[in-house]
Image (cartoon, rainbow, N blue to C red):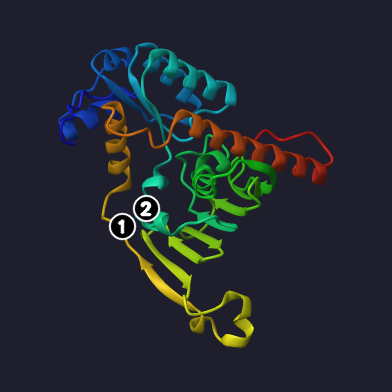
Amino acid sequence: MQGITFAGFHDANPERAATVAAELGVTSHASLESLIAASDAVSCVVPTMSHHGVGMAILAAGKHLFVEKPIAVTLDEADALVSAAATAGVVLQVGHVERFNRAVRAAWPHLADPLFVQSDRLAPYTPRGADVAVVLDLMIHDIDLVATIVGSPVIDVSAVGVPVLTDTLDIANARLEFASGAVATITASRVSRDKTRKLRIFQRSGYVSLDLGTGAGMFFRMRADVDPRDLAAQATSLEQFVEPVPLFAPEGEPLRLELESFVSAIRGEQPVVVSGAAGREALSTALRIVTDIDRHALRLRGGALRPA
């Protein structure tokens, strides 16, 4: 990235740190304190359980913080990070990288008052992220994305999910109702054979279909010469009243765009794209989903709650 000097990194595993430093020719700091002292801004990419502890140390030193999603494990931890950033007067950005997906960027100009959103995020199992439920590991991407697209508060949550390979939830489905009247269904799994990242958005002007995996998208728009109040009399097939519009956005690796936006926010060139408050809101909805899954599981088992 232009205009940026990489101060180095810290890894709690000394052997891994030495390997990375040698491979990339970068500085490995022996402690988090050393890294913080050498930096103006720090990217916190550690297991979710450590986001609060590491993040608070960075903010306490008055350094700008980029923290991966989810912002924290609990709302109290999230609130502490948001408050510490405000007190220090520094930028806090949360790593909801799908905001920078090419398909999502291409869709924004065509989105208008969504009524129904369907999201599917399915992935093969990997130990990374398995320290928390799939809702906090994978689904939270789409919780943030759907809430941003709808632009309205979540007023009701209903969800189901089960553990399969781990002691936490590995597959989950949630239904969200928004104050605007919009409804979304979100499915996330980390026990699937193939990767799927699809988002479908239905609104009065048409239907937006996005493949977040490939960055491609299509807008199936109502034709201007068709009266939607009299479709039955005017058309006998979908093609007669809908026109496909391919969606395009400039190329850009989402992670790079995300970090460039963080730097721009630090420089005061643009607002923070995903603020600590936005990250906290996504976490709040995710925790509501986990709670509802626990309630559903308790009703089925008639016993004690299983940790989520």
Is residue 10 visible in the rendered structure shown here? no
Quadrant in the picture for the N terminus? top left
The quadrant the C terminus occupies is top right
Is residue 28 left or right of 166 when viewed as pictured?
left
Judge left or right: residue 1 versus residue 86: left
Callout 2–callout 1 Cβ contact below 8 Å: yes
**Count of marks overlaid on the render:** 2
Q: Which mark is residue 105?
A: 2
Where residue 250 appears, as percent x and y from the top left, is 26, 55
From mark 2 to mark 1, how far is it between C-alphas? 6 Å
- Mark 2 crowd level (few <14, some 14–19, many ≥20, 10 Å Cα): some
- Residue 257 lies, in percent from the top left, at 29, 43
The answer to whether 18 is drawn above or below residue 240 in the figure is above
Relative height, residue 36 to residue 42 (above, below):
above
Q: Residue at x 54, y 52 (%)?
A: 191
Mark 1: amino acid? Ala
Q: Which image quadrant for residue 289?
A: top right
The x, y position of residue 276, in whole percent, is 46, 29
Residue 117, above or below 137: below
Which quadrant of the view contains residue 294?
top right
Amino acid identity at mark 2? Arg
What residue did someone put label 1 on? Answer: 249
Q: Secondary structure at mark 1?
A: loop
Between disc 2 and disc 1, whose residue precedes? 2
On the question of residue 245 being in view, the answer is yes
